Image (spheres, rainbow, N blue to C red):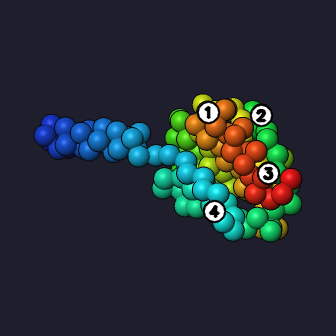
Amino acid sequence: MKTNLSPKLRLIITAAIIILVAVLSLAANVRVVLGQDGITASATFAGKTAVSYTDIETVQLIDNLNPGSREMGLGLPWLLGGSFKNSEYGSYKLYSYNNCKLNIAVTYSGGVLVFNRKTEEATTALYYEILKMIGE
């Protein structure tokens, strides 16, 4: 099928795509907040998940997560966010930077939440903060 797009329209479409990719690159991030009552994890364009500290069953620091397949959410070369499914957790929520190999897995009454920070050091520090918040 041949399209008859003018060179000017092609240039406009290309520029719009480049701008969109640049905006995603600058804006996409993972945010994890340890509040008074629980953890809230979110990623740009991928929603958020909140877990009460009283609902937490286990907290694990995991290395080299296999994210599995994305069911719904964001999949960028540097960031994953949303609903994912793998053989270890089944369907779960993921908010993770791909360049950081450490993740925190929180099993709670509603499922599994996995997230990290930009660096392994920051992720490890967050893990210990969570343990303090739940009294472990």
Amino acid type at image mark 4: Gly
Q: Residue at x 74, y 52 (%)?
A: 130
Taking the spot 84% from the left edge, 57% from the top edge, the residue there is: 135
- From the viewer's perspective, is residue 36 above or below residue 88? below
Residue 98 appears in the picture as rendered? no
Mark linked to residue 35: 4
User: Pointers 4 and 3 in contact (CB under 8 A)?
Assistant: no
Q: Is residue 75 left or right of residue 22?
A: right
Report whether 116 appears left or right of 108: left
- Marks 2 and 3 sit apart, C-alpha to C-alpha, by 18 Å
* Amino acid beneath label 2: Asp
Q: Quadrant of residue 24?
A: top left
Quadrant in the picture for residue 133: bottom right
Tell me which numbered mark, 1 or 4, is placed earlier along the sequence: 4
Query: What residue sits right under mark 2 in the picture?
Result: 63
Secondary structure of residue under mark 1: loop
- Badge nearest the viewer, 1 or 3: 3
Instruction: Give the residue type at disc 1.
Output: Thr
What residue lies at 55% left-to-right and 51% top-to-bottom? 31
Measured as percent of width and height from the top left, residue 97 is found at 59, 39
Task: Kindly identify which residue carries mark 1.
Answer: 119
Q: Considering only vertical position in the picture, is 80 above or below 77?
A: below
**For the residue carrying disc 3, how many other residues have a C-alpha within 10 Å: few (<14), some (14-19), or many (20+)?**
few
Between residue 48 and residue 85, name the one nearer to us. Answer: 48
Q: Residues within 10 Å of mark 1 (few under 14, many from 20)?
A: some
Depth check: give the residue in front, 32 or 133. 133
Q: Earlier in the sequence, mark 1 or mark 3?
A: 1
